[in-house]
Amino acid sequence: MKEMMVGSVAPVGGVGRWGAAPPQELLERMKDYGQEGAFALWDELSPEDRDLLVRDIESLDLSRIDRIIRRSMGSQGYVAPAEPVPESSVSRVEERSPEDKERWWKKGLRAISEGRLAVVLLAGGQGTRLGSSDPKGCFSIGLPSGKSLFQLQAERILCIQKLAAQSSDSPRNTLPIHWYIMTSPFTDDVTRKFFESRKYFGLEADQVTFFQQGTLPCVSDDGRFIMETPYKVAKAPDGNGGVYAALKSKKLLDDMSSRGVKYVDCYGVDNVLVRVADPTFLGYFIEKGVSSAAKVVRKAYPQENVGVFVQRGRGGPLSVVEYSEMDAAMTTEINQSTGRLRYCWSNVCLHMFSLEFLNQVANSLEKDSVYHLAQKKIPSIHGYTMGLKLEQFIFDAFNYSPSTTLFEVLREEEFAPVKNANGSAYDTPDSAKLMLLRLHSRWVVAAGGFLTHSVPLYMTGVEVSPLSSYAGENLEAICRGRTFHAPSEISF
């Protein structure tokens, strides 16, 4: 911070409200935490800017932030070695009978109809890599319908509510699914207005709750605050794992409990094929009686840039190892009995938790206060400078779970991420669109429909509205014996 120190210069417009020096009590507190460098340019500031700086620092929970910085920077302790996930902890696609799937589907729909499932959407990210400053959920990937990611997900919730009501003994008493949408300071206002201007895509306004994830100061390698301007500390969102602290601090876990919620479906916004509030996954979760579960897909190839689930020591909890933390041997190691990768279960941010466990993990994460340190370019008074962002990840919860099970799904049915702009090698709007069109085309053909197309079918397909079918069910009446021209949307 020494480079920020400057000589005394009389501020424009007099000393103002705070006098020639920062408020003494606040300065002493900052000294206690080694952060007095935030006042280094005080003498150069106008009275208005001094007021902004004081208010900015007063808005920070300094004792909490200090604890997070100290524990995160000093947490390079022992980590139990990674072991492959035990076979008994994974439900594989090929092991499921039609009877299993029907039983889980019905069990899940019943719980949904009784209001026992809430859905949490992680939607704090902007579409920067997609060439858009809007929230990712506002993005349209170019489907025939032109629907945004938010609209596709809202309509899947509407469809599941309808299916739950139809399966219930008392359809009129079926409760709506409450949707909690986590935004960030950069996406909150635009997201709210996007929903309002589109009348919540057919959902009731009071079944959607928006809440912001927290932010934390960006720090230098020695833990000092980086100043974005002379009167503002540089801050960044606290990672998608900030959802736990946000749900707790905003009393939304209590809100869920008051609504009778027992289970929480949690997912990321940028998956075009996400099965929001999936009854099959919920029914499986309830039947297993575990605290947490995750949908997983098999790694496509050893070098795929995805985190994988591991077991931390024999008999330890399941957790996620990021791709960057895996050495070449671990990445390519083969299970000799199956001929497949030993570390093959990819984390795709499709999670299910019990509400009881979410309360426990929110408390435990806050108590431990260990965050991941990410080296990033931080905007500062010296231009962009390298510094540290403090983040928690959604999968940090699994380290605290007494029981976790993994539920394999097929990539081509449930995982089409939208992360990079068209023209990139993978995870683009075009690649995700094609996955959806191909999947829905298979649904239509399986339901007895026919397709015509003016370009090769592997390059196109049809889109089935989520309002017509959630996962390919109930399409025979719409499709049997009919011909549809690709690309187009089928909506009834």
Image (cartoon, helix red, strand yellow):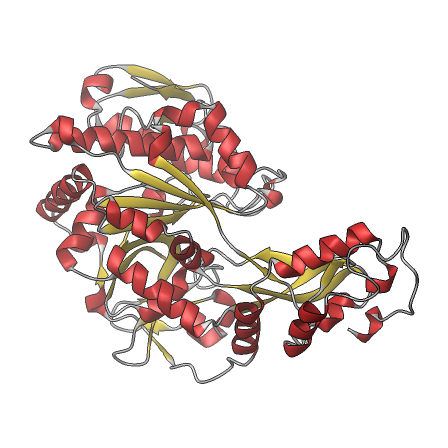
State the residue at coordinates (42%, 39%).
Answer: 272
Residue 432 in the figure: left or right of residue 491: right
Whether residue 198 is visible here, answered yes or no, is yes
Tell me where residue 236 appears, x and y as whole percent: 60, 56
Marker count (numbered): 0
Residue 303 sits above or below residue 147 on the image: below
Q: Is residue 90 above or below residue 156?
A: below
Residue 202 as seen in the image, left or right of residue 258: right
Residue at 25%, 50% (x, y): give it: 257
The residue sitting at the top extreme is 482
What residue lies at 22% left-to-right and 51% top-to-bottom? 262
Question: Where residue 386 appears, x then y in whole percent?
Answer: 71, 66
Quadrant of res 159:
top left
Where residue 339 sits, quadrant-wise, is: bottom left
Task: Tell me the quadrant of the picture where the N terminus can be found.
Answer: bottom right
The C terminus, quarter of image: top left
Residue 157 picture location, percent across and down: 30, 34
Where is residue 133? Give x, y as percent.
62, 39
- Of residues 155 and 338, the one nearer the viewer is 155
- Does any portion of residue 342 appear in the rendered image? no
Using the image as rendered, state which of residue 110 and residue 443 is in the foreground: 110
- Camera-nearest residue between 105 and 207: 207
